Image: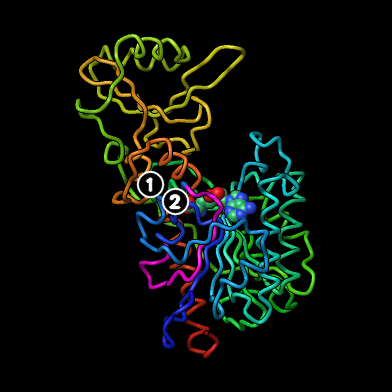
């Protein structure tokens, strides 16, 4: 940022598609310093600034304004993160893929990286939904990887589900780009024949990290100029947690009146209604979360009682907001999940909220899960930073 001190931190990053700043929340605790944030959404900016108070760093410009964006980035950031819009990589965006109006902004980001020239970040972290792996038969992911390789990055990729850390199922695919200027000993490179077997071994070692849809792409996509690497990471250890520590069950919550409650009871599938009735009869407490879904012309309440909430989404239409279902003392009750509960399920229980619930739910539904980012930092980003720092490759 303009005015940064001469001896400012070299552990710097720029966050693209910054949203409400949850990537920043995941990186800052280990010492990363955000020097630039970019996102076009003024409502998310409001939330971001409530939490980070950083009026200068947030640039509300469209990422496609390459020259202006580049002119705002001072010095060489060590890392650039980009959790670009996912809508076109899913059914909601009719699988338009990287040619869609929203997800194509990935190339707005790579255009900025290219224009940075000598200032290109040493590391890049990309995040998106796992639909990225299958969108247009995997060709979107292949093309994105080739574009990053063209800019001089060796690439690793893996899938992490937030449910390893918090009771929310949120699988996401990450790409880590390591600039060719980094000579890391931690990386197993594909191109070196002597380690080809080791690279393949790393690739297949943990199918939860690199499922077949991903390892197949990595095995069969040639990257121009660089290649694939494997960082020798293990899947995160499963944390033990209780959904009831994240979702409130006390009487002071906004539980719905009888009419809405009965309506939702009747929306349960036969199977779930039976489970609910059995628990009510046995007076056993049960907590679940669900969504309303249109199925064969009628609206159903699809709930899960496995102790994990479904993936939080942006509340476009009534079907995308999570509903809390609670059975206690033989009573069935339901209500909307609150922004505070969304915050907890994204791993930021103390995040400052604005009064507008809808604004907050939009922010959280689009965001990353913070402990996942911190885990990637601890296992991949910070070790690479330390290695470069020891080799005087920072700044
Ligand atoms: C998946 S969300 C990222 C959320 C963010 N990682 C967080 O934790 O809040 C994608 C973001 O991209 C922003 N965006 C979409 N198109 C953009 C563009 N052309 N230029 C800049 N930002 C854009 C949206 O406003 C949205 O906040």
Give the vertical position of 259 relative to 160 (above or below): above
Q: Nearer the viewer, residue 19 or 54?
A: 54
Say if 348 sits above or below 323 in the image: below
Q: Position of residue 256 (x, y in %)?
A: 31, 18
Q: Residue at x 50, y 37 (%)?
A: 314
Residue 231 in the magenta stretch? The answer is no
Residues drawn in magenta: 26-42
Q: Is residue 123 visible?
A: yes
In the shown orientation, is residue 268 left or right of residue 144?
Answer: left
Q: Residue at x 40, y 32 (%)?
A: 306
Q: Image check: 180 left or right of 263?
A: right
Q: Which residue: 45% across, 69% down?
A: 34
Q: Residues within 10 Å of mark 1 (few under 14, many from 20)?
A: many
Mark 2 surroundings within 10 Å by alpha-carbon count, few (fewer than 14), some (14 through 19), many (20 or more): many
Residue at horizontal 56%, vertical 71%? 72
- Locate residue 33 relative to residue 141 in the image: left or right: left
Disc number for residue 369: 2
Q: Nearer the viewer, mark 1 or mark 2?
A: 2
Q: Position of residue 115 (x, y in %)?
A: 70, 72
Residue that carries the numbered disc 1 in the rendered image: 166
Q: Is residue 84 visible?
A: no
Closer-to-camera residue (57/170): 57
Q: Are marks 1 and 2 in contact (CB under 8 Å)?
A: yes
State left or right for residue 4 relative to residue 203: left
The image quarter in which residue 74 lies: bottom right
Say if disc 2 is inside 8 Å of ligand 1.
Answer: no
């Amino acid at each position: 940022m303009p005015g940064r001190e001469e001896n400012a931190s070299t552990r710097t990053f720029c966050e693209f598609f910054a949203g409400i700043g949850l990537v920043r929340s995941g990186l800052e605790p280990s010492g990363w310093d955000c020097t630039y944030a970019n996102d076009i959404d003024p409502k998310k900016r409001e939330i971001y600034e409530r939490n980070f108070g950083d009026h200068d760093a947030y640039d509300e410009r469209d990422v496609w304004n390459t020259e202006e964006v580049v002119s705002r980035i001072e010095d060489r950031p060590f890392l650039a993160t980009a959790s670009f819009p996912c809508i076109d990589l899913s059914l909601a965006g009719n699988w338009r893929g990287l040619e869609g109006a929203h997800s194509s902004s990935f190339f707005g980001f790579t255009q900025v990286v290219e224009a940075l020239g000598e200032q290109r970040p040493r590391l890049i972290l990309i995040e998106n939904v796992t639909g990225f792996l299958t969108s247009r038969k995997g060709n979107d992911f292949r093309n994105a990887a080739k574009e990053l390789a063209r800019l001089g990055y060796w690439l690793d990729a893996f899938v992490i589900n937030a449910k390893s850390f918090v009771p929310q199922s949120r699988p996401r695919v990450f790409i880590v780009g390591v600039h060719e200027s980094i000579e890391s000993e931690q990386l197993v490179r594909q191109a070196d024949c002597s380690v080809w077997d080791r690279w393949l071994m790393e690739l297949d070692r943990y199918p939860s990290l690199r499922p077949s849809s991903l390892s197949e792409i990595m095995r069969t996509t040639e990257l121009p100029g660089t290649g694939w690497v494997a960082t020798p990471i293990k899947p995160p250890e499963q944390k033990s947690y209780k959904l009831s520590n994240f979702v409130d069950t006390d009487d002071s919550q906004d539980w719905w009146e009888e009419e809405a409650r009965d309506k939702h009871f009747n929306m349960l599938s036969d199977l779930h209604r039976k489970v609910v009735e059995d628990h009510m009869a046995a007076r056993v407490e049960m907590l679940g979360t669900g969504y309303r879904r249109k199925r064969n012309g009628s609206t159903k309440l699809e709930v899960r009682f496995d102790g994990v909430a479904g993936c939080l989404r942006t509340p476009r239409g009534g079907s995308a907001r999570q509903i809390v279902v609670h059975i206690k003392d033989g009573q069935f009750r339901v209500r909307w999940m609150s922004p505070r509960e969304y915050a907890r399920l994204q791993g930021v229980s103390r995040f400052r909220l604005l009064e507008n619930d809808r604004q907050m739910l939009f922010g959280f539904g689009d965001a990353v899960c913070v402990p996942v980012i911190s885990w990637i930092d601890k296992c991949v980003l910070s070790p690479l930073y330390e290695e470069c720092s020891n080799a005087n490759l920072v700044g």
